[in-house]
Amino acid sequence: MGKLALFLCFIFSVFPADAFENRRHIHIVRRGSKNSHRGDTVAKIWIEENGQKKIEIAWSELTASEEAEILAAIDAHWEEFNHRIDDIFAGKKIKIKKIK
């Protein structure tokens, strides 16, 4: 799993298999769970469509206010997340960004 960022009580991440999906997306994992893997994902957020910025919720177990905060954070850091995702899929190591 490639961890992109820490935000509030969440980890924004991507998985190696995501490189082959038709739309780029970010998995939202609640921090503090013992295993940070797909089973602990609380939301999946699409961040683009056909290479263009398009942020929307694929599915979510979050509250409406959590969703709003996460969508705003993704929007504010969209370009950086895309670069980080490219680096992760290229096998590069990245530092986890802390979003305030």
Image: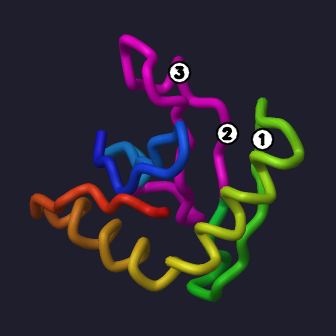
Instruction: Tell me how far mark 2 sits from mark 3, CA to CA.
Output: 9 Å
Disc 2 from disc 1: Cα separation: 6 Å
Q: Which mark is residue 43?
A: 2
Q: Residue furthest left?
A: 92
Q: Residue 23's image quarter?
A: bottom right
Q: For marks 1 and 3, give the CA distance.
A: 13 Å
Q: Which residue is mark 1?
A: 59
**Which image quarter is the N terminus in?**
top left
Q: Are marks 2 and 1 in contact (CB under 8 Å)?
A: yes
Residue 40, labelled with which disc?
3
Secondary structure of the residue carrying tag 1 is strand
Element class at badge 3: helix
Q: Which residues are magenta?
A: 19-45
Secondary structure under tag 2 reads strand
Counting other residues with Cα less than 10 Å from the Cα at mark 2, is it few (<14), some (14-19), or many (20 or more)? many
- Disc nearer the start of the sequence (2/1): 2
Q: Which residue: 35% across, 56% down?
A: 4
Residue drawn at the location 63% of the way across and 88% of the way down: 52
Q: Nearer the viewer, residue 36 or 24?
A: 36
Label 1 sits on what residue type? Trp
What's the amino acid at mark 2? Ala
Picture coordinates of residue 79, whole percent (x, y): 46, 85
Q: Residue at x 42, y 47 (%)?
A: 13
Residue 21 colored in magenta in the image: yes
Q: Measured from the top left, where is residue 11 in percent x and y?
A: 45, 42
Q: Is residue 14 left or right of residue 10?
A: left
